[in-house]
Image: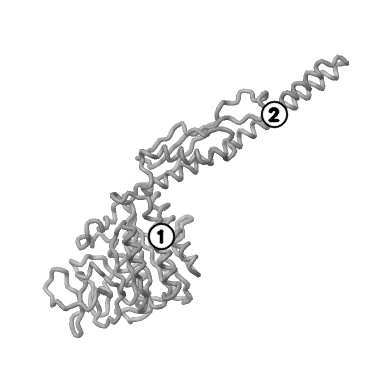
Amino acid sequence: MSTTISSTIRRFADDRSGNFALATASAIVVVLMAVGTALNVGAMVSAKSRIRNALDAALTSTARDLTTGKVAEKDARAAVERFLSANQGNGFGGDIRLDTLTVDRTAKTLTGNATVQTPIVFPMFSGVAPDRLGVESAAAYSDTKIEVSMVLDVTGSMKGTKIADLRTAAKNAVGLFLDGQDPKDPRVRIALVPYATAVNTGSLANTVYIETKGGSDVPPGLSDPRLVVAAPDNCATERKVKSGVMDFSDNGPETAMVNRDDRLGFCPSAALMPLTADKKALAGRIDSFIVNGATAGHIGIQWGRYLLSPKWKDVLPTSARPAGYKDKAIAKYAIIMTDGEFNTAFVGDKGAGASSGSAVTLCDAMQDDGVEVFTIGFMLTEANAKATMKACASADTGRVRHHYEAADGAALDAAFKEIAANIEKLAITK
């Protein structure tokens, strides 16, 4: 095309018929130069926008993988280059080259500079265009460790497709949290607390005080003298400070054990699981969920809190011990899920009011300790149940939601996935 333009200009210049030809040729040259330059500039602006988007995406992806442990710091450059290479066919007209990549361990940022061959539509009008166009971008990552307590409803109303949906959604969330991290130095650990009328404490059954009819409701400390009563199961209800009054503290069992109310009749078969990064074990426990019983949601929240509390570390295996609340390298989260109203309690008026009120009190206490609380209502119809879940959730921050209503299994899965993604985002800002 440039040869045709040049020939046309020469013909006008060689025309001796008058000054008109020369003037016309000059005007054409000016117009063509303006058009050619404009097209060249437009192509460069477009290319620069595309390479900036590609670099932004590459740095964001690599920062996320650094955050989750999927990519080690020493492999960050290779990860960015792989991402850029995958975008070579997106109309750049030349190879994208990563010139520099800086990992700032103090600011927790990745900063990169990338260039691409300057696209020239009309070479004869390229002027002083640079050989390569360059852009700079940055993304934040985090080495904050994460502790998540998942408090999950396994009551009788969860039968049928509901429990199948929960198993799928919970396991998918576990995968999002744990996939790709270094098993020898896990960044994310998850605790499970399935609940119904009570909580099966499993390996923590030695922290449970078995009430007897006519006996004291006030539990002793672990080392205090007490009458040892054979436990009918490993279940626990609320910890009490006196008859009919719940202990809302997260004190360890050395201070006071946790009651198993003498009126308890049903115990869930699936036991809680303290903090772990063992994906297979977590998935196996989730698959073992069997539904039955009523909804003592506050008891589930109580144990979800204990498994995040440093005051309980002495009765937990080393790998399951929670970090301190004030540890800036740790972020703690609770995910509470239910499909119905909290309707059972062994303290207070022993009904929905006591369970819902106690749940909100415990959620507030967790938030006071720095635990961020997410809640999911699954096919909820009761106004009180919806209000309790909303009241338990932390306040929304920016675009991060903390309360979800899921109308079906797909929405439940989406809620868990979004919470997992939001926890990752929040951890970067802590």
Given the current orientation, which residue lies at the most extreme left position? 225
Q: Is residue 133 above or below residue 388?
A: above
Name the foreground residue: 255 vs 90.
90
The residue shown at (28%, 72%) is 200
Given the current orientation, which residue lies at the most extreme right position? 17
Name the foreground residue: 259 vs 55.
55
- Other-residue count near label 1 (Cα within 10 Å), few / some / many at <14 / 14–19 / ≥20: many
Q: Is residue 66 left or right of residue 132?
A: left
Q: Which mark is residue 305?
A: none
- Compare marks 1 and 2 and give the one earlier in the sequence: 2
Q: Is residue 409 above or below residue 22?
A: below
Visible residue check, residue 370: no
Q: Is residue 48 left or right of residue 167?
A: right
Given the current orientation, which residue lies at the most extreme bottom position? 214
Name the foreground residue: 270 vs 358.
270
Quarter assignment of residue 342: bottom left
**Amino acid type at image mark 1:** Ala
Q: Is residue 198 above or below residue 371?
A: below
Visible residue check, residue 234: yes
> Which structural element holds mark 2?
helix
**Amino acid type at image mark 2:** Gly
The residue shown at (72%, 27%) is 1
Q: Which mark is residue 173?
A: 1
Q: Is residue 139 left or right of residue 367?
A: right
Position of residue 11 measured from the top left corner of the image (x, y, whole percent): 81, 19
Residue with the mark numbered 2:
36
Q: Marks 1/2: CA distance?
A: 54 Å
